Image (cartoon, rainbow, N blue to C red):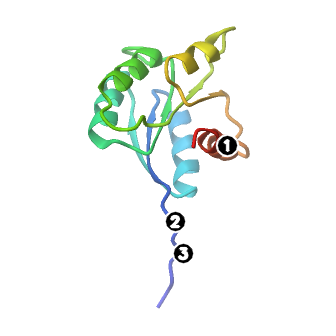
Amino acid sequence: MTETKKTASKGVALIIEDNEDNLVLISALLKRDGYRVIVAMTGLAGVEMALKEKPDLIILDIQLPDINGIEVLRKIRAKETESPIPVIAMTSYAMIGDEERLMNDGCTGYIEKPIDPTRVLGQIDTILEEKR
C-alpha cells in the first residue's frame, strides 16, 4: 500500500488572470502550497465566481480583456455580504499611484509582475498575515 502525502488545505484560491502562462505558474504554486485553485480568465467571470464560490483568497490581474481589475474589485466589494475576501492584485501595471489606488479600492495587497516563483508564496502569506 502506498501512502500519499497530503498537504493541509489552505482553502480555495480564485485566480482571475487572462494570461495562460501566468495562470499556469501561479496555479501550480498555490496548489503546491495547499490551495484548491479555481480560475476565471475574464473580469466578469471572476466576479461571478467570487460571489458564487466565496473563495478564501483572490489573485487578481488588473489588465483583463473585458473589464479591468479595479472594476472587478469594486463589483465584488459592492456585493459581498460576509467578511471581505482577501484580494491580492498581481499585475505588471505598475504606474505611480496604482498600488495606493488599489489598496484604497479594497485590495488586501499588491504584488508586481513578473513574479518571482521562489518568493511569491511568502509574499502572499505576509500580506494575509498583516490583514488578520
Q: Which residue is mark 2?
A: 8
Instruction: Using the image, determine if residue 5 lies above or below residue 122.
Output: below
Left or right of 38? Residue 101 is right
Q: Which residue is mark 3?
A: 5
Left or right of 80? Residue 87 is right
Element type at mark 1:
helix
Element type at mark 3:
loop
What residue is shown at x 68% (from left), y 43% (from top)?
117
Camera-side mark, 1 or 2: 1
Q: Label 3 is placed on what type of residue?
A: Lys
- Residue 126 badge: 1
* Residue neighbourhood size for the residue with mark 3, other residues' Cα within 10 Å, grouped as few (<14), some (14–19), many (≥20): few
In the image, 106 versus 19, the foreground residue is 106
Element type at mark 2:
loop
The percent coordinates of residue 92 (x first, y second) are 63, 20
What residue is shown at x 58% (from left), y 56% (from top)?
33
Q: Earlier in the sequence, mark 1 or mark 2?
A: 2
The quadrant in which residue 76 appears is top left
What residue is shown at x 71% (from left), y 38% (from top)?
116
The percent coordinates of residue 130 (x first, y second) are 64, 40
Q: CA distance from mark 2 to mark 3?
A: 10 Å
Q: CA distance from mark 1 to mark 2?
A: 18 Å
Q: Label 2 is placed on what type of residue?
A: Ala
